[in-house]
Amino acid sequence: MDKLVETLLQGDHVGALSEARRLLALGIAPERIVTDGMETAMRRLDDKCTVESFNLLEIMLAGRAVSAVVNELYPEGAPPAQGRATFVIASLEGDIHDLGKNVTRMVLIGKGYRVVDLGKDCPVETLVNAAEREHADAVLVSGLITPVIPQVRKLRPALAARGLDGIKVVAGGAALKQATAEELNVDYVAETAFDGARYLEQLARRKTE
Ligand code: B12
């Protein structure tokens, strides 16, 4: 795992891919590769990505290596037209971080859900429109910067204003997981993509019972 972390930090996407393949061949679960490998590497980039100090090239190369490994771990690609449940996901307006969102999308697609990805820097209204159009069972938001929290808090009232009160709102990402569901005005705050997937799994099960 240390070698994977090192290659990710070096932005060596070819090396990272081969380390991820080696770990998979050893029987290490993709979930551990994400939490112990990818999340550890990105946490170590913390001091290179602050408001005061910012090394864009280094972080983007590491991000590219993370994306390459995600595509290797979860190769399902495009979401199926029909899934067990439908989710819409986005990083909200003002937030351009999307690596964690992409991991979450791939994990959920891997579990057979239909996931409509609205990308990053997405206005609340666009997300609500998509939830209505796609008959979503839940709206998922990823937030990495604290200033995006007021946007997250607007989601539930915006859904209710369209009569979509039944849709669950799930939040995740480094900035949001430091807050409670109550503070964010959401139904659930996920620690990791897998924790979020377990919560959504329970919702889908309850729906079919
Ligand atoms: C990579 C990175 C960037 C990249 C983003 C590339 C990309 N395509 O995403 C770039 C270089 C663009 C960037 C820019 C900036 N960044 Co930056 N960035 C990071 C860094 C180093 C890693 C984030 C990451 O990708 N982690 C890896 C992923 C896999 O982890 P994750 O997102 O937590 O996701 C996991 C779970 O949380 C979960 N998850 C995530 N979302 C969701 C959603 C749902 C629904 C569920 C269920 C689960 C879930 O799933 C994942 C797997 O388990 C963090 C440091 C950190 N500790 O997070 C700073 C960090 C987030 N950035 C920060 C800052 C300040 C910035 C800038 C403002 C810097 C600047 N001077 O301009 C800009 C922001 C621009 C903007 N308006 O958004 C701060 C935010 C501080 C704050 N609390 O507000 C951090 C925390 C760094 C720091 N210590 O200060 N950044």
Image (spheres, helix red, strand yellow):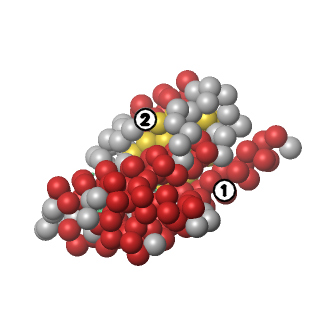
Expressed as whole percent of the image width and height from the top left, the position of residue 139 reads 55, 42
Residue in the picture at 46% in, 72% down: 1
Disc 2 marks which residue?
A: 118
Decide if residue 204 is in sight here.
yes
Q: Quadrant of residue 167?
A: top right
Horizontal arrangement in the rendering, residue 95 relative to residue 196 (left or right): left
SS at mark 2? Answer: loop
Report the amino acid beneath label 2: Leu
Q: Is mark 1 within 8 Å of ligand 1?
A: yes
Specify whether residue 163 is in view.
Answer: no
Q: Is residue 114 above or below residue 134?
A: below
Upstream in sequence: badge 2 or badge 1: 2
Q: 92 or 113: which is nearer to us? A: 113
| The C terminus - image quarter | top right
Q: Amino acid at mark 1?
A: Tyr
- Disc 1 designates what residue? 199
Q: Is residue 130 left or right of residue 203?
A: left
**Residue positioned 54% across, 47% down in the render:** 74
The quadrant of the rendered image in which ligand 1 is seen is bottom left
**In the image, is residue 158 above or below residue 33?**
above
Determine crowd level at label 2: few under 14, some 14-19, many 20+ residues with C-alpha closer than 10 A. Answer: some
Residue lying at 39% horizontally and 72% vertically, measured from the top left: 3
Q: Secondary structure at mark 1?
A: helix
